[in-house]
Image: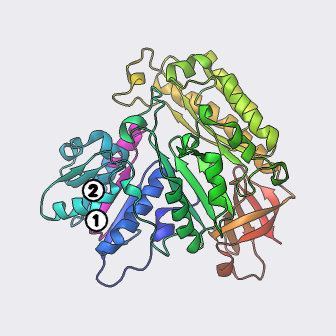
Amino acid sequence: MPIRIADAVTEAAPQGAKRLFVKSYGCQMNVYDGIRLADLMKPHGYALVEEVEGADLVVLNTCHIREKADDKLFSDLGRFKKAAPQAILAVGGCTGQALGAKIFQQESAVKIVFGPQTIQRLPTLLEKALRGQRAIDTDFPELEKFDRLPTPGAYGASAFVTIQEGCDKFCTYCVVPYTRGAEISRPHGDIVAEVQALAAQGVKEITLLGQNVNAYQHEGVGLATLCQLVGAVPGIARVRFTTSHPNNTTPDLIAAFAPVEQGGNPKLMPYFHLPVQAGSDTVLARMNRNHTVASYLETIAAVRAVRPDVAISGDFIVGFPGETEEEFQQTLAVAAHVGYVGAYSFAYSPRPGTPAAELPDQVDEVTKKTRLAALQAVLDAGTAAFCERFVGQTLEVLVEGPAKDAGQLRGRSPHNLPVNFTYGAADPVALVGQLVPVTIRRSTQRSLVGKME
């Protein structure tokens, strides 16, 4: 994603400030939570730093979706306690929620454990840890974590705003209903107030987040209406949302993607992340996805009918228990048919406590690895083809900062494609955070290269 915690809130630490290091794993909602953690600790004298060495408080904001994420957590804990032996170690996020006190047993250096719904209680937990006690909080308070608005100066040109948390879908492979709880939507007035605070700081692009973001519903306001309310905030030029479920894609949300002359939302960007997970109805049934391949493709076709150039991204799981070669080939066919601009694709990883972990016919690791490589090749071809279509066009690019190559800046197109471009005699510092016209000269596998006009 175009924003990192360090990009958003790291600043020169005031003299005498304590040092806070936060590492977030996994989804954009964890990135959002990581930013809020850093923001939360500021009044308590903690300044966010980019390096763990010398930190006074180390927070690992974790993901529990795949086994490798858990392995990475405990590997990092071992490294971080050596790099910052004086620090208080805290484990938050979904692994904190799922494992709870077991984390203390696996790594004695950890003093604090909390879940994604209790990040706002970190200062209280820290007080307990500083008294030499272990502190844990894995409750499920509904909206308490959103009580505090962003601190001025904490964000760049883009920002995430969580509008919905939890999941009621209970896919057989997924731990989210157990780590994030049931679906709950924030009051739309609170969301607009947060966006207004962000716009006052110069934020121009808002990405609305949720485990099932298009399930958002509060007092008759659904996601399509919320996108209008957010886009109407002065200073906000772009609105995006992620991640959606096919079954919650409503007609008014599809209509919002239409051009403005056809009644669409002019601030809603032509980018739609809609996971399918598999291209076989039998696999989808075992996953408990509650949609079919046909219904999924009908949704894609409906969005493209109102916005033909929309960028579609998705999620895939290969090697799900019982997946046959024929079923996998059906997944490849869907990937080729849709032509995704990007996708998160993973080999199935059994998670303890989920129904899929107990299914028969678990696929071997070699087969999963081979299938993942084959799927990725199809997805990469789709991304390259989508990027190529913009060569010769002039796109509006939101400037994020300097690119790796000297004399270039980086930004994002309306379709969420990375763009690196030259800017001539313009002041690059003044351009950051601005929307500028860039003529695309060439494309790469996953990005665009151009020149500011």
Q: What stretch of residues is rendered in magenta?
A: 52-73
The residue under label 1 is which amino acid type?
Leu
Depicted 188 relative to depicted 437: above or below:
above
Quarter of the picture containing the N terminus is bottom right
Task: Residue 56: give x, y in percent of width and height.
Answer: 26, 69
Front-most of residues 85 and 100? 100
Q: Residue furthest right?
A: 392
Front-most of residues 17 and 230? 230
Task: Residue 191: give x, y in percent of width and height.
Answer: 52, 58
Q: Residue furthest front?
A: 219
Which residue bears the numbered disc 2? 90
Judge whether residue 247 is colored magenta: no
**Quadrant hosting residue 419:** bottom right
Which residue bears the numbered disc 1? 57
Depicted 301 relative to depicted 431: above or below:
above
Real-space Cα distance between discs 2 and 1? 8 Å
**Quadrant hosting residue 451:** bottom right
Residue 336 seen in this snapshot: no
